[in-house]
Image: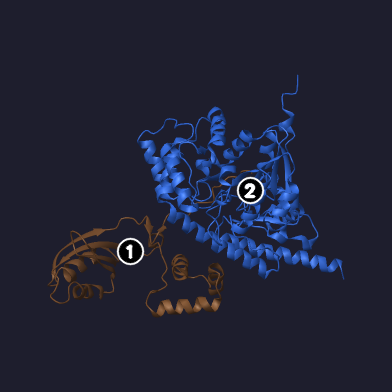
Chain colours: A blue, B brown
Amino acid sequence: MRNPLADKVTGIKPSGIRKFFDIVSERKDAISLGVGEPDFDTPWHIRDEGIYSLEKGKTFYTSNAGLKELREEICRYLQRKQGLVYDPLKEVVVTVGGSEAIDIGLRAMVNPGDEVLIPQPSYVSYEPCAVLAGAVPVIINLKAENEFRLTARELEEAVTDRTKILILPFPNNPTGAIMERRDLEAIAEVAVKRDLFVLSDEIYAELSYKEKHVSIAQMPGMKERTILINGFSKAYAMTGWRLGYACGPANILEQMTKIHQFAIMCAPTTSQYAAVEALRNGDEDVAEMCRAYNQRRRFLLNAFREMNLPCFEPFGAFYVFPCIKEFGMSSDDFATRFLDEENVAVVPGTAFGECGEGFLRISYAYSVEKLKIAMGRLERFVGRLREEQGKRQP
Amino acid sequence: MLREELLAVIEKNSRIDLKELAVLLGIQEAEAVEELEALEREGVICGYHTLIDWEKTSNEKVTALIEVRVTPQRGQGFDKIAERIYRYPEVRSVYLISGGYDLMVILEGKSLKEISAFVSDKLSTLDTVLSTATHFILRKYKDHGTVMARKKEDEREMITP
């Protein structure tokens, strides 16, 4: 029999987070700080609206690009939050999570051999999606000393004549890094000069703890070369509803919608009705969850300070990214031993790119009570490692 | 804003220690102490009570909601009559209500008998009370924003990425 599989697919290595999760799920009393999904339930009024839509018999497909009502609400939301004006009829597509938007965005824009710039550490899907789209992924290694922000210089150095797209994943998973207005201005300048398109993954936009999130699409000359991706999973705790969206220039959105139409038809109808309610009446829920995340963020940073574990202050998403280089072991070894000895699962930074070596991703989508227990164990573990080190170097 | 956030935290957990409270809010411990003292002084914080599900104990308790219609008194409105009612220790809460009746009284007693005795002997006999309607609580599902049923486990499944 012939090999049934495509080389392009088999060549993609499996996600690095998987391994730990497999071990964690076997252990009953393990505390996992590995999950990248809110611990809150979807606010009740949003769920209720989904249920109500079912009661009313709204069980048909929506139009391919999504309910018109929802697209209008998305545009109102982006205008209200970021001052961005999009045409709900031509410049928006509602997708199955932000993930689908990333996939179809790349597929709609990339020709074989085009280079796609991917800053890392970052979400693990960009690289495989770029490969599947036929692009050549080019990694930009972000640096701890820049608080894992992308600098214009790093971008400039990575651009070649074949570069077409820059993926901009901020607020960032796994580092929690954000890009502020001045950071984005510098990036925008290079993007315009080098004629790059930007796929801006802003799924964590609402979870910004310093100032209001700023999109690169707000920078001069950028709206016409930016695909803005966002969704409902993180801000409204709606992961299971699988709903996201992309906004951008009509000519690109038309092609993205074409792929979406042939591969997916439309995003789930029930979720779309619930999302309309989320955008209309969900601001207070978002603010409340955001306050809770921010408290946990402060709690973890304080815990790291107390155990002398270096960690830059992240201002976005729900992750912290402490540095463990002092222990002279790989992130993977550290995470494995920590799980073995203290029964706490964290994700090694290397799961998000090689430059994540020496770091851990810790999610704070967990209650303070749980974080407190986990930090107690981390402190004990770190103390033990330091003691071992002391013995080795008398 | 800080005040509201502090209140929201301790409303959910009044036993939180001061150091942790300060960390969560991103302020100094001394600042948290000062703010708490001010809130107590101003009567914003009226107490640090514990939410108890008495049903799970052997201590039997009966709670009743009593709708009370009264004649307001000249110059004192409802305040005087409310005071006469809330002075009874078995009265847990008294609210002035808009709509079909005037005062909502929440009463706690050891038995139905005890509560009916209170209503017939003490409450109904007050001059200004026109009528009462007593509703016994059969089950508390949620109280003070807290669902009384057992907490559910973390149901998030393992998923990558």
The quadrant holding residue A61 is top left
Q: Nearer the viewer, residue A147 or B115?
A: A147
Mark 1 surroundings within 10 Å by alpha-carbon count, few (fewer than 14), some (14 through 19), many (20 or more): few
Residue A279: image x %, image y %?
43, 48
A38 in relation to B98, above or below? above
Label annotation for residue A201? none
Q: Is residue B158 visible?
A: no
Q: Nearer the viewer, residue A101 or B31?
A: A101
Query: Residue beneath label 1, please?
Result: B61
Tell me what residue is drawn at x 52 percent, y 54 percent: A206
Tell me what residue is drawn at x 75 percent, y 52 percent: A355
Q: Is residue A45 visible?
A: yes
A57 in relation to B160, above or below? above
Mark 2 surroundings within 10 Å by alpha-carbon count, few (fewer than 14), some (14 through 19), many (20 or more): many
Tell me what residue is drawn at x 51 percent, y 51 percent: A235
Is A386 situated left or right of A372 in this image? right
Q: Are marks 1 and 2 on the same chain?
A: no
Query: Residue beneath label 2, please?
Result: A168
Tell me what residue is drawn at x 12 percent, y 72 percent: B127
Q: In the image, what residue type sits under mark 1?
A: Lys
Is A84 situated left or right of A35 in this image? left
Residue B99: image x %, image y %?
20, 59
